[in-house]
């Protein structure tokens, strides 16, 4: 399926459900719960703990309502992007200092780049951090490499690693301390241009991916992994492609946040912790509504992790103190409130499990829009799943290479930086 067809099919599928994925459940409770089809909640409520976990994992155990079943199947089909399979194993020496996630990512990115970079001699990494990927690209491909990051402390650590890599041609890797921004930046812009250059962004937060795309219009190859979509500006950063604009969705800040939540295969302990955190947070919300209705929705913030495992009273006292609110209740009364609210907090939790079904689809809508923008610039674009989601959930690579100009297709406009 090409990117346009996939985006059109996904937006058609998602649009009728925008009430569910574009709004916060908790902030709009209980009206938000009413947006879920009548049969969905009783189905979710019929699940035991294992069933809830399977629902969280994208399965529909037992006998799901037909509307939910067909929606989840359609979402699954349209979000099934092809996989990149290759791995380029790092030696023990090269993997030193890398955690399991980073080693996993780099081994796959090197394998992905290998066959696509025959004509590449130079590389730039936007948000390159400590430069682990840069160092290992220099080792593997012998490129000249510029790693740009706005965090000088990270880059200093990267220089330490570089000093330790004795057999590496160190002069080939240069750290540049700079904040990459939209608009002209004379010192760094030339690093993104040239048929022999690859522009890399491994987990560029929010709209930094778009900045990379805009700067790399003259690059031979672009590789980007997006992340932290909630840091995008919903009005400015989506949609960005012409095709996306003609098939736009009402993406809100809430929807962007949901797009960062596509994550499968939680362990039993991870799922139990998530459930507990939610239970405590939802009970506090119901308590605050009852005691201080005039306040409206109150942001409670994150409590220290260990507090979630304690009684509701311990968690609530910590939050109430931070919010400078006095509910005038003893610990026993707080705990008894939580028990009495448990059926309702479970319903809120189950709505979240159902809403999370849309997370991956929203992420892919954002990435397809970026892919189509690159196609409109004259690139040939692939979207591939590359990392094991358990280790690295933002696992989709956007790979753009210059389309071969055919005899009767002119792509000259791509030589003119597109104004977007
Ligand atoms: C999620 S981290 C990824 C780091 C690295 N690519 C990796 O995979 O380990 C994002 C990095 O981008 C850097 N960054 C964020 N915005 C930036 C900007 N506008 N210009 C330069 N660096 C930026 C941050 O300092 C951070 O190191």
Image (spheres, rainbow, N blue to C red):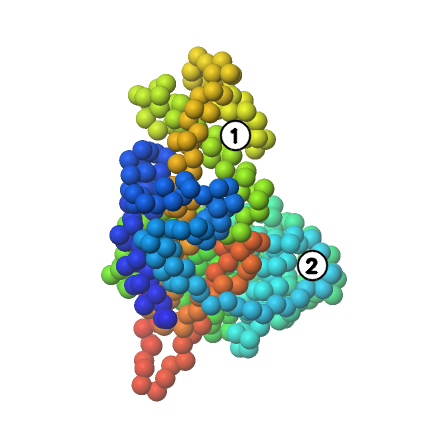
> In front here: 168 or 221?
221
| 1 or 2: mark nearer the eye | 1
> In front here: 66 or 235?
66
Q: Residue at x 41, y 59 (%)?
A: 76
Q: Residue at x 42, y 74 (%)?
A: 402
> Is 375 on the left-hand or right-hand side of 393?
left
Q: Residue under label 1, please give it.
A: 303
Give the structural element (helix, strand or loop) at label 1.
loop
Asked where in the image residue 364 lies, by quadrant, the reply is bottom left
Quadrant placement of the N terminus:
bottom left
Residue placed furthest toward the left: 246
The numbered mark at residue 95 is 2
Q: Residue at x 29, y 50 (%)?
A: 17
Residue 396 appears in the picture as rendered: yes
Q: Residues within 10 Å of mark 1 (few under 14, many from 20)?
A: some
The numbered mark at residue 19 is none
Spatial separation of the CA atoms under disc 1 and disc 2: 35 Å
Precedes in sequence: disc 1 or disc 2: 2
Q: Position of residue 383 (x, y in %)?
A: 44, 66
Quadrant placement of the C terminus:
bottom left
Labels 1 and 2 touching (C-beta < 8 A): no
Give the structural element (helix, strand or loop) at label 2.
loop
> In front here: 190 or 361?
361
Asked where in the image residue 26 lies, by quadrant, the reply is top left
Q: Position of residue 43 (x, y in %)?
A: 38, 44
- In the displayed structure, 224 sits above or below 24; it is below
Residue 180 appears in the picture as rendered: no
- In the displayed structure, 50 sits above or below 379; it is above
Does the Cβ of the disc 2 residue fall within 8 Å of ligand 1? no
């Amino acid at each position: 399926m090409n990117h346009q067809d996939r985006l059109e099919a996904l937006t058609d599928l998602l649009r009728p459900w925008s009430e569910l994925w574009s709004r916060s459940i908790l902030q709009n409770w209980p009206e938000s719960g009413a947006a879920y089809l009548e049969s969905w909640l009783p189905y979710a409520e019929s699940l035991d703990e294992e069933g809830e976990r399977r629902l969280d994992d994208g399965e529909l155990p037992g006998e799901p309502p037909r509307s939910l079943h067909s929606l989840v199947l359609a979402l699954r089909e349209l979000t099934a992007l092809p996989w990149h399979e290759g791995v380029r194993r790092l030696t023990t020496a090269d993997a030193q200092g890398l955690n399991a996630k980073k080693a996993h990512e780099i081994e796959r990115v090197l394998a992905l780049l290998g066959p696509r970079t025959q004509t590449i001699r130079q590389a730039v990494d936007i948000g390159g951090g400590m430069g682990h990927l840069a160092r290992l690209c220099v080792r593997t491909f012998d490129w000249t490499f510029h790693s740009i990051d706005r965090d000088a402390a990270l880059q200093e650590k990267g220089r330490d690693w570089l000093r330790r890599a004795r057999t590496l041609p160190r002069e080939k890797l240069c750290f540049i301390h700079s904040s990459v921004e939209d608009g002209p930046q004379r010192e760094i812009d030339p690093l993104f241009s040239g048929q022999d250059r690859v522009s890399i962004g491994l987990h560029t937060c929010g709209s930094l991916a778009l900045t990379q795309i805009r700067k790399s219009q003259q690059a031979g190859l672009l590789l980007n992994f997006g992340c932290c979509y909630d840091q995008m500006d919903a009005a400015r950063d989506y949609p960005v492609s012409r095709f996306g604009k003609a098939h736009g969705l009402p993406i809100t800040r809430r929807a962007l946040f949901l797009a960062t939540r596509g994550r499968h295969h939680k362990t039993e302990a991870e799922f139990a912790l998530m459930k507990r955190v939610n239970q405590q947070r939802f009970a506090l919300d119901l308590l605050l509504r009852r005691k201080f209705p005039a306040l409206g929705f109150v942001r409670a913030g994150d409590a220290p992790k260990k507090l979630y495992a304690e009684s509701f009273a311990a968690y609530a006292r910590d939050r109430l103190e931070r919010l400078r609110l006095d509910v005038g209740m003893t610990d026993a009364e707080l705990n008894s409130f939580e028990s009495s609210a448990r059926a309702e907090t479970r319903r809120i939790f189950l709505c979240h499990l159902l809403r999370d079904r849309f997370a991956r689809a929203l992420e892919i809508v954002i990435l397809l829009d970026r892919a189509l923008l690159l196609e409109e610039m004259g690139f040939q674009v692939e979207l591939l799943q590359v990392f094991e989601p358990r280790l690295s959930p933002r696992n989709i690579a956007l790979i753009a290479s210059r389309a071969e100009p055919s005899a009767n297709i002119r792509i000259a406009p791509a030589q003119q930086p597109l104004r977007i």
